[in-house]
Amino acid sequence: MGLITSSLCLALPIMLVLWLWVRPLFSGRWKTPGWFIATAGLCVVAAAATWILGAFAGSSMDPEESCHMAGTAYDNAYRSAHWQEPSRWFPLHNRCNASYDLVPAWVNPALVLLPLLATTCLGVAVWLAVAHKRTKMGEA
């Protein structure tokens, strides 16, 4: 019951945000700087959520217990040799052994692409704002 409730609590705001984000695509208003700024903000929020998901990957705060819950062996010698790896900000890793990582494989690429997309959207927003201002000044 708790899983269904928490899924609904997350899904409803996400659906609302996506509806507000997608609606300008159909009406043609996506060509405004505001839409690109909102998209950049959405990318930043998604990157933060992705980082939190990756940083706290595993079913518990105890890595040995998380590895056993994931169905893989916990290698204490490997963890001792690579003790700094789980505390890095980027790239995120929380390895049980040399071949299994608790952090999903898509997390680190998403942490590169989402800020890059946000930066691109901000650049397009500035470009559109400057072009709009030049057009207005040319008309006056």
Image (cartoon, rainbow, N blue to C red):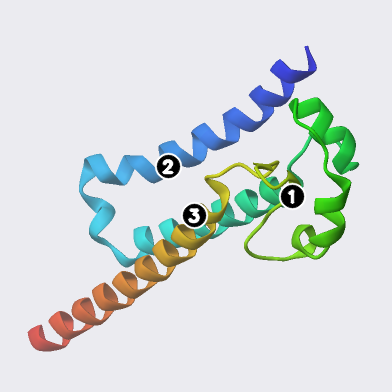
Residue under numbered circle 1: 94
**Residue placed most toward the observer, 76 or 119:** 76
Quadrant in which the C terminus is drawn: bottom left
Give SS at disc 2: helix
Cα separation between marks 3 and 2 = 26 Å
Which of pointers 1 and 3 lies earlier in the amino acid sequence?
A: 1
* Picture quadrant of residue 22: top left
Query: 10 Å neighbourhood of mark 3: few (<14), some, or many (≥20)?
Result: few
Give SS at disc 1: loop
Residue 105, image x, y percentages: 55, 44
Residue located 83% across and 38% down the image? 74
Query: 10 Å neighbourhood of mark 2: few (<14), some, or many (≥20)?
Result: few
**Residue placed most toward the observer, 17 or 92:** 92
Quadrant in which the N terminus is drawn: top right
Amino acid carrying label 2: it is Leu
Residue 128, image x, y percentages: 25, 73
Residue 81, image x, y percentages: 82, 61
Amino acid carrying label 1: it is Asn
Residue under numbered circle 2: 20
Circle nearer the viewer, 2 or 1: 1
**Residue placed most toward the observer, 104 or 129:** 104
Residue located 66% across and 24% down the image? 7
Which of pointers 3 and 2 lies earlier in the amino acid sequence?
A: 2
The reply to whether dot 3 and dot 2 touch (C-beta < 8 Å) is no
Residue under numbered circle 3: 109
Query: Height in image: 94 above or below 23?
Result: below
Query: Height in image: 109 above or below 1?
Result: below
Residue 8, image x, y percentages: 65, 23
